[in-house]
Amino acid sequence: MMRRALPSSFLVLAALVLPGAPVLASTKDESVHVVEQGETLNGIANRAGVAASAIVKANGLKEPYVVKVGQKLAIPRAAAPAPAPTAKPRPAPTATSRTAASAQAVASKAAAVSAETEEVHAVAPGETLGGIAQRAGVARVLIIEANGLQPPYAVRTGQKLKIPRTRRHTVKAGDTGFSISLKYAVPWEQIALANGLDAAAPVKAGQSLLIPTLVDARAGPAPIPAAAAQPVKTAQPAAVRFLWPVTGEVRRKFAASGNPHDGIDIKAPQGTMVRAAAAGIVKFAGAEKEQFGNLVVLDHGNGWFTAYGFLSRVTVKEGAKVAAGERVGLVGSTGLAKGDELHFEVRQDGKPVDPLDALPKAP
């Protein structure tokens, strides 16, 4: 199996922007907003001064709360937020002040170089939003939306700004939208939206894809909608962390190099019950036609995920809480299975872990 990372739907996407996209207009006075190219729910909520959860509720949006170009969103209105303080006009510079300003600018530039590697940047004297964005190599609109800034987008000395990061992925032979989504833990619909692609169309080798930045919901400017499930916290031993999901011979083991295989394939009769390796929340439950067939992904908290593929039938629903040992599906031969077997993966913080290192000795 290609290297992938499991989904993280409990994270909230920062704003997306396409190359050459203009700075988005304020929605502060709108009661109905028409979604424009590159906009996201969080960005619209930030500019409108309305909680994302309120827009979700007013429009009956469903997870993962993706909005589409041209979609009309009702903007529920509450008490108007206090206006941003008006910047005081600067006095005309004298020869002395010009010299001081020049020295200050040099110092500011040196201090701001660190913005290239910072996730949070403290605004230095003389800096502007545009300058910070340019030095950090991040679109200005991304910083505006990640920090919930309002027009005229002035920043003040000492203000701490989140610098959202974007990544790029060059499509390789064998890549699919699903495998790319798993690798970066970003829903494929959001990656497709960020690149102006049809989410249903196949990817092409050589394509360069913008991977949207994920921002921890606890640090984001908009609250998580109430419907979003929280990961289950489970205290488990450091070595034997999971239970065997099914009893059977391991046909193919984990391999980190050569012909990489990110999990193990366990042989078992068709219809054998597949059990959750630990308590968790169902993050994906459905068909993945390219490789895994019928697939279930569980989030166990603290960065741990397990995946169960090749199922003949999925018996849980997304968002459901499952106990350790509870049935999540039935053994099958869907996807790229070589017979009746279960494909089982374990990941920590998005990186594949040899399941045999996290399981008791073979039953």
Image (cartoon, rainbow, N blue to C red):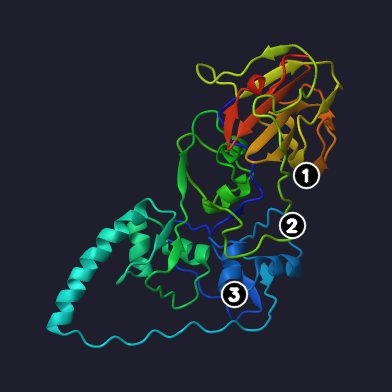
Q: Earlier in the sequence, mark 1 or mark 3?
A: 3
Which residue: 58% across, 61% down? 40
Q: Which secondary structure, mark 3?
A: helix
In the image, residue 339 above or below residue 92 = above
Q: Which secondary structure, mark 2?
A: loop
Q: Which secondary structure, mark 1?
A: loop
Q: Which residue is mark 1?
A: 318
Marks 1 & 2, CB-CB < 8 Å contact: no
In the image, residue 167 above or below residue 73 = above
Q: Earlier in the sequence, mark 1 or mark 2?
A: 2
Q: Amino acid at mark 1?
A: Glu
CA gap, disc 2 and disc 3: 20 Å
CA gap, disc 1 and disc 2: 12 Å
Q: Earlier in the sequence, mark 2 or mark 3?
A: 3
Which residue: 68% across, 79% down? 77
In the image, residue 174 above or below residue 252 = below
Q: Which residue is mark 3?
A: 48
Locate residue 221: give its quadrant. bottom right
Q: Which quadrant: the N terminus? A: top right
Dot 2: few (<14), some (14–19), or many (≥20) neighbours within 10 Å? Answer: few
Q: Work out whether residue 350 or residue 186 is closer to the camera in this orientation and state it.
A: 350
Q: Is residue 170 left or right of residue 334?
A: left
